[in-house]
Amino acid sequence: MDPAKKSKPPRARPLEINPIDHIIRCYGGRTIALDMEPNHMGHAKRHEDWIQYINFLNQKNGDLRLEITFYRECFQHAEKFKDKINSLSQDLLHECIIGLLDTTSLEEIRVISKRFLEAVDELRGSQKKAFDEFIAPYRSAQKTPRPELFPKNGWF
């Protein structure tokens, strides 16, 4: 018998908790990664009646939709950033080639370099806006967490 057929596929690892999950926990909220913790799994499955269980599932469904929306938006920002960086890289390469032929194109290279920085700042701003929108429901439901829990530079 072929040993490759006997081997089982590797087990999927549970979701790992990231800094965003910790921030939401500080506001009193829960994410799917937090709900997958072993100490919370058993508690989440215990409900006194079906109405309570259905309400719990509706709440979880809403939470998951909010998480999906947030991560989808972050992915879209990252894709837009990638496209912009690819375009800027091509512009920079073009200007460097022209710069070999013409020494006056140094200013164009500086302009493109500034556009790289602007692209990074734009990504940082759009990701911060997405995060603020994602965390807003948790903020309104809970008191403000300790400031040392947030990264100082805005990146997670």
Image (cartoon, rainbow, N blue to C red):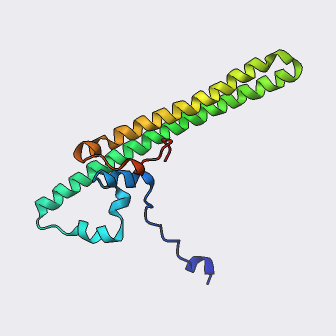
Residue at (48, 41) in percent of width and height: 154
Residue 69 percent location from the top left of the image: 37, 42
Residue 110 percent location from the top left of the image: 72, 23
Q: Nearer the viewer, residue 89 or 106?
A: 106
Count of residue discs: 0
Is 126 above or below relative to 1?
above
Q: Nearer the viewer, residue 51 or 112?
A: 112
Residue at (41, 50) in percent of width and height: 148
Given the current orientation, which residue lies at the most extreme bottom position?
1
In the rendered image, the quadrant that contains the N terminus is: bottom right
The answer to whether 95 appears left or right of 31 in the picture is right
Residue 76 percent location from the top left of the image: 48, 37
Residue 113 percent location from the top left of the image: 69, 27
The answer to whether 73 appears left or right of 4 in the picture is left
Is 133 above or below relative to 34?
above
Q: Nearer the viewer, residue 2 or 134?
A: 134
Residue at (33, 55) in percent of width and height: 25
Given the current orientation, which residue lies at the most extreme top position?
104
Quarter of the image for residue 96 reads top right
Residue at (63, 25) in percent of width and height: 115
